[in-house]
Image (tube, helix red, strand yellow):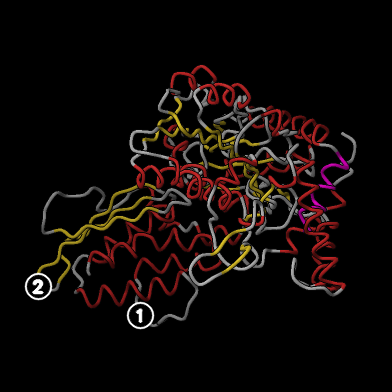
Amino acid sequence: MMTNPWVKDFPQLNSGMCYLDTAATSLKPLSVIETLDHYYHDLSANIHRGMYHAAVETTQLYEETRETIARFIGAETEEIIFTRGTTSGLNMVAFSYGLAHLKPGDEIIVSELEHHSSFLPWQEVAKRTGAVLRFVTLNEEGRITVEAFQETLSEKTKVVALTYVSNVMGFITPLKEIVSLAHDTDAIVVVDAAQAIQHIEIDVSDLDCDFLAFSGHKMLGPTGIGILYGKQNLLQSMEPFEFGGDMNEDVEKGQSTWKTAPQKFEAGTMPIASVLGLKTAVEYLQSIGLKQISEHIEKVHRYAIAQLSQIDEVTIYNKTSETGIISFNLSDVPAHDAITFFAEQDVALRAGQHCAKLICDWLGIHSCLRASVYLYNTYKDVDRLVEAVKQAVKYFKELGF
Amino acid sequence: MSGLDNLYREVIMEHYKNPRNKGLVENENYKTFRIKNPSCGDDITIQSFVIDGIIKDCRQEGHGCSISMASASVLTEMMIGKTVEEALEVAENYLNMVSNKQYNETMDLEEAEVFSGVRQFPARVKCASIAWVAFKDTLK
């Protein structure tokens, strides 16, 4: 394989770390770090308030980010809300839209593939409204299929909250068909795109989903910033989730009014540096192209599956995954024992339930290891992982595991 | 790999493979406390049976990594026969040791001394602590 042209852009790799944990958070390219630095070093101003030069430039960059994100996912600028991350975007939908619209007996469709941030807000809203949670039956591989979704869908369905790509299984949900079916019964569809946004070209106008949330830090951007996309008519009909500065239009003792979306959902001072950094991250992704990124992931991923499959003591739970996520265990070695071994070798993986306990229950496991590959990974990273796995198998066997 | 060998000491492996006092009893005189760690999937239940301020029995059940399983096993064996005061003092000292806080090095931590290697692995402190925290709660 040719040398990876993108590795040099990621200073975190200078230490020699073998980074296979992008599903937890991606690395950050130098250009993103420089943007953060520019804000803190040269601007440090608040937005929408000051008249001085730095404040004007900051406001301009902030609003340009919204335009960049809108174009990136095929939305209108007014449909892009800055949030703290996927979790806060999904909570906003559940507690602003869900609480106001759901009634006893209404149904919310979720799946066992959901990350806790796409499941718990709806579990809580169901409890408070008397709505009922329904789970799409996963097929034998653990996938959401259109057929199974159709069986779960009914006239009572009001909300469909599904993941685009599972953070444990890596499977892509057939969302387009699901959205169309859901709309036939007037249900809205909320998409958790945290594991999709960094490698799948998303066009929300084509997908036609009603809400879609993702995080900056999983797409080469900073932490503390995320995006909630919402269809304009829905956003305008929703009440603000937080109240405070910059989201109001007029404040009186008795009654106050709010700005229109998206501003009414951005109360208080937002993580401005992170917003600006996210713009740089998207520009970096666009300069390469998501198609090229996903092709690269696919190559490295296929190589990793082929290599790991040759080790008898390795059980892979999602061999047929079409994305870069590999979930596996070593025979008779609890994931947290194995992960310590990998950490000693500076091979960065994740172990545990990955904030997705329902799919661990479905798989019948208490926890597992997860490797996730992205654009800065190489065949050499896979070789290092495979070598570490072989050594770990030997080490724990000799200890008597 | 010397750091790892310091973690996976022989005593720990021996308890992991042959856990003591495993299995819960159904007896209302036993105080039971369960802790689940949602990030790693450890799930441990500890029971203690106290008469006249003395721990007459201590049981454990659950699943998790070798460090959490072995530390539960060592805990139960050590605590049987101790007074509640002694037990709490030992547990506190042990928890301080594994989390790399100041602890009383002159106190005899018996077999639990082998978990001192955990200090070098901050990510594993929870593994070594979970059963002991649950145990303290059974005495409340």
x%, y% of residue A309? 63, 28
Give the residue number, with chain letter if any, for mark 2. B52
Residue A221 or residue A91, whichever sits in front: A91
Q: Earlier in the sequence, mark 2 or mark 1?
A: 2
Residue A132 or residue A235, whichever sits in front: A235
Residue A283: in magenta span: yes
Residue A364: in magenta span: no
Q: CA distance from mark 2 to mark 1?
A: 24 Å
Residue A216 or residue A388, whichever sits in front: A216
Q: In the rendered view, would you say B122 is above or below A321? A: below
Q: In this image, A219 relative to A124: left or right?
A: right
* Helix, strand or loop: magenta stretch: helix
Q: Are marks 2 and 1 on the same chain?
A: yes
Chain letter behind tag 1: B
Task: Look at the image and tell me in which quarter the N terminus of chain A lies.
Answer: top right
x%, y% of residue B113? 41, 69
| Circle 2: residue type | Asp
Q: In this image, B127 relative to A320: left or right?
A: left
Q: In the rendered view, would you say A108 is above or below B98? A: above
x%, y% of residue A163? 57, 36
Chain letter behind tag 2: B
Marks 2 and 1: which is nearer the front? 2
| Circle 1: residue type | Met
Residue A186 is at least partly visible in this image: yes
Q: In this image, A13 relative to A367: left or right?
A: right
Give the residue number, with chain letter if any, for mark 1. B107
Residue A230 in which image quadrant: top right
Span of residues in magenta: A276-288
Secondary structure of the residue carrying tag 2 is loop
